Amino acid sequence: GMLTTDDPFQYLGGLGLAVRQLDGKAPELYISNLRGSGANGGAGRVEGAAKFLATELATRNFHPGYIRGLMDEGYAGTLQVLDGINNFAGWQSVAREIVRDDQWQEFMDVYVRDKHRLGLAKWFEAHNPHALAQSIERMLEAARLGQWQADPRSVAELKARWRELARRYDVRTENATFQAYVDAGF
């Protein structure tokens, strides 16, 4: 998938970034989708990267069944959540045209607000609160950098949750600019 490792955004996204740097506009990015079965799935198809990413998010990263499976894995599952968000942020950096604000918002709604009522706060805190804090840091960095046009309420909620995790679990960041941002207004 596009979010399971950093290879897709490094290579395909990196090529797109290089073309944008040279031409001044982003190229269209395509994925060879070899998933599925039957007439279309077995033979494969070419899809736009934005569509493929949106489908992967909906059917994997944001899907309650997938998340329940991650929860069964404990600590390792928390790292998979963090990897998905980190790789999504990688796409944001190299191919911003395929990432949407509502997808960032959905990461927050699913993993921080626990949209599916799976008990994610307790799960993260029991297995790896630092993974949740790092995920929130990624979301806040996207907002701070203007990559995600997050509403002020969401930003304030993310900042408060990060500060709470930092206080309770000795979470730290090496990013002084982020630390000033998360502490602003507190």
Image: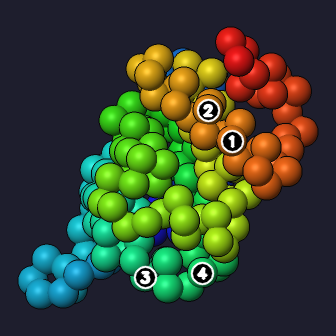
Task: Determine whether, in the image, residue 40 is placed left or right of residue 161.
Answer: left
Name the element at disc 1.
Answer: helix
| First-in-chain label (2 vs 3) | 3
Q: Position of residue 145 (x, y in %)?
A: 63, 21
Mark nearer the viewer, 3 or 4: 4
Task: Determine whether, in the image, residue 89 is placed left or right of residue 54.
Answer: right
| First-in-chain label (3 vs 4) | 3
> How many labels sit on residues?
4
Residue 124, placed above or below residue 90: below
Q: Amino acid at mark 1?
A: Glu
Residue at 80%, 20% (x, y): give it: 180
Name the element at disc 4.
Answer: loop
Residue at 79%, 43% (x, y): give it: 167
Residue 36, placed above or below residue 25: below
Mark nearer the viewer, 2 or 4: 2
Label 3 Cα neighbours within 10 Å, binned few <14 / some 14-19 / many ≥20: few
Q: Quadrant of the N terminus?
A: bottom left
Residue 50, placed above or below residue 75: above
Label 3 sits on residue: 69
Q: Quadrant of the C terminus?
A: top right
Label 1 Cα neighbours within 10 Å, binned few <14 / some 14-19 / many ≥20: some
Gap between marks 1 and 3, in whole Å? 27 Å
Please report contact status of discs 1 and 3: CB closer than 8 Å, yes or no: no
Label 2 sits on residue: 160
Q: Amino acid at mark 4?
A: Gly
Q: Amino acid at mark 3?
A: Gly
